[in-house]
Image: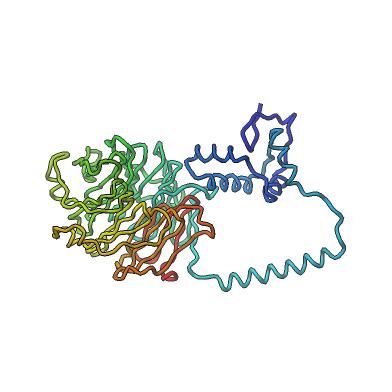
């Protein structure tokens, strides 16, 4: 016994309707689709939104050339979406010709006048639908990596958008990616509680597969974030269990050097200062914690105390980033705000509030990522409202809002800026987009 290609119910090719691919595509184009309960089930199974699950199914319909088997119930629901034949009028060919010419002219005008700020899409899945949880650029700005919900790490060529490689090995969704400063390693963190280090030497070779260098184990709950120290010697990882681990990358598969209870709940993000002296962590409780790295490495497990704790959004902090000169610290919040602190004041002032320079508002939903441009003049923030915003460093003025889709139905899950300052990448529940910053500023 087979199953219905729409809802999964039992069906038989001998007793139930079978639709040719072209005919079924026309039904879907006319509005036919799965029941809401079916879409909800798909979303739960895939770990994506219902909208993304539906678009994935529609993509499958568009690409499938085989017949579609439907159960009696689904076949019955197709009735309103079947085209009813009618007598063609003699003037229809002329009207169709005029419409076709008009469409061609309109398309040509749209192409000529298309704004240069349009993003180029990098498809992280053959159906072009998968949640990209995090993105990162290689130090030479030639490669962008994406952490996906379907347990993969995707790699694309920035110049062409070509799919370079797909890294497999994680048992659950991948939540974080980071390149080492020398570009020789790529770290990926996952909800399977592991961190994998991949050698990058063969990543760009045609058909090559990067060798998995080693797997780091030790977190009791899923890994939420990873970051290399500026000298490349250390890898910091945060977990949903509220701990931060520092791994000596040069020690191979040796255990983490230090484990610190950084937050009472989740550590949602972390970042090293440009000089490597500070490590900032963003907590689910909203606190932004600054750690003295040399002191952290010199203390025993759980013995280190934070250098400073800053008050972020009470609803929770999601991400954190230092400016390239190390003078500013930005953090995204679940309340849709971005807070920016003066690092020097944060370290020296007794009044923690005095270090807060500004609070940026404008996002309609939670901020999911923050990143400075290499020159430090712009701050980018991604949000669950489906947008990426560009803010001016000194004034905090909103310069541009990037929207990859007309409907804000796909949350922007992360943001990264290429080291050469040309490209901005954002991941979301549909694909990974590259924006040319030369045309959006």
Q: Would you say residue 385 is visible in this rendering?
A: yes
Could you tell me how many numbered marks the image carries?
0
Q: Identify the residue at image location x=36%, y=47%.
A: 176
Farthest residue, direction top:
1
- Image position, residue 43 (x, y; %): 52, 41
Colour setting: rainbow
Query: Is 391 above or below relative to 316?
Result: below
Q: Position of residue 44 (x, y in %)?
A: 50, 38
- Nearer-the-camera pick, 70 or 348: 348
Q: Is residue 163 left or right of residue 60?
A: left
Task: Return the x and y of residue 340 as percentages of the image width and height.
Answer: 28, 61
Q: Residue 185: in sight, yes or no?
A: no
Locate residue 368 relative to residue 37 in the image: left or right: left
The image shows residue 315, relative to residue 326, as above or below, that is: above
* The image quarter in which residue 362 lies: bottom left
- Identified at 29% across, 57% down, the residue is 321
Query: Where 428 sits versus 69, above or below?
Result: below
The residue at 15%/46% (across/down) is 305
Q: Nearer the viewer, residue 254 or 79?
A: 79
Quarter holding the C terminus is bottom left
247 to 160, vertically: above or below: above
Where, quadrant-wise, is the N terminus in this rendering? Answer: top right
What is the quadrant of residue 253 in the picture?
top left
Residue at (36%, 55%) from the top-left corner? 369
Image coordinates of residue 328 in percent, x first then y, are 24, 62
């Amino acid at each position: 016994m087979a199953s219905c290609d729409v809802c999964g119910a039992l069906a038989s090719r001998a007793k139930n309707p079978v639709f040719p691919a072209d005919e079924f595509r026309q039904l879907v184009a006319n509005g036919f689709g799965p029941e809401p309960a079916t879409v909800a089930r798909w979303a739960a199974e895939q770990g994506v939104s219902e909208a993304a699950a539906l678009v994935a199914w529609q993509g499958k319909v568009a690409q499938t050339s085989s017949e579609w088997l439907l159960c009696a119930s689904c076949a019955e629901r197709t009735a309103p979406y079947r085209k009813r034949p009618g007598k063609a009028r003699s003037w229809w060919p002329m009207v169709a010709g005029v419409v076709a010419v008009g469409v061609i002219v309109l398309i040509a005008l749209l192409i000529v006048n298309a704004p240069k700020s349009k993003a180029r899409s990098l498809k992280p899945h053959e159906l072009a639908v998968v949640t990209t949880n995090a993105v990162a650029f290689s130090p030479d700005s030639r490669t962008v990596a994406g952490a996906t919900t379907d347990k993969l790490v995707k790699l694309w060529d920035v110049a062409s958008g070509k799919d370079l490689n797909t890294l497999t090995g994680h048992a659950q969704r991948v939540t974080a990616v980071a390149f080492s400063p020398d570009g020789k390693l790529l770290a990926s963190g996952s909800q399977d509680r592991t961190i994998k280090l991949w050698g990058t030497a063969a990543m760009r070779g045609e058909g090559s597969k990067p060798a998995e260098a080693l797997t780091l184990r030790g977190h009791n709950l899923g890994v939420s974030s990873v970051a290399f120290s500026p000298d490349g010697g250390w890898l910091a990882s945060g977990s949903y269990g509220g701990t931060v681990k520092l791994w000596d990358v040069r020690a191979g598969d040796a255990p983490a050097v230090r484990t610190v209870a950084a937050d009472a709940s989740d550590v949602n993000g972390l970042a090293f200062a440009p000089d490597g002296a500070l490590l900032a962590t963003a907590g689910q409780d909203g606190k932004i914690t600054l750690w003295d790295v040399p002191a952290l490495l010199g203390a025993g497990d759980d013995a280190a105390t934070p250098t400073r704790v800053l008050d972020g959004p009470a609803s929770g902090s999601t991400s954190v980033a230092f400016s390239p000169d190390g003078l500013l610290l930005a953090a995204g919040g679940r309340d849709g705000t971005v807070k920016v602190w003066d690092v020097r004041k944060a370290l020296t002032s007794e009044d923690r509030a005095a270090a807060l320079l500004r609070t940026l508002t404008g996002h309609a939903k939670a901020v999911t990522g923050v990143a400075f441009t290499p020159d430090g003049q712009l701050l980018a923030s991604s949000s669950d409202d489906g947008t990426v915003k560009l803010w001016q460093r000194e004034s905090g003025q909103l310069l541009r809002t990037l929207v990859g889709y007309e409907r804000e139905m796909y949350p922007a899950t992360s943001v990264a800026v290429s080291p050469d300052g040309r490209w901005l990448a954002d991941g979301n529940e549909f694909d990974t987009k590259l924006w040319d910053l030369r045309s959006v500023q």
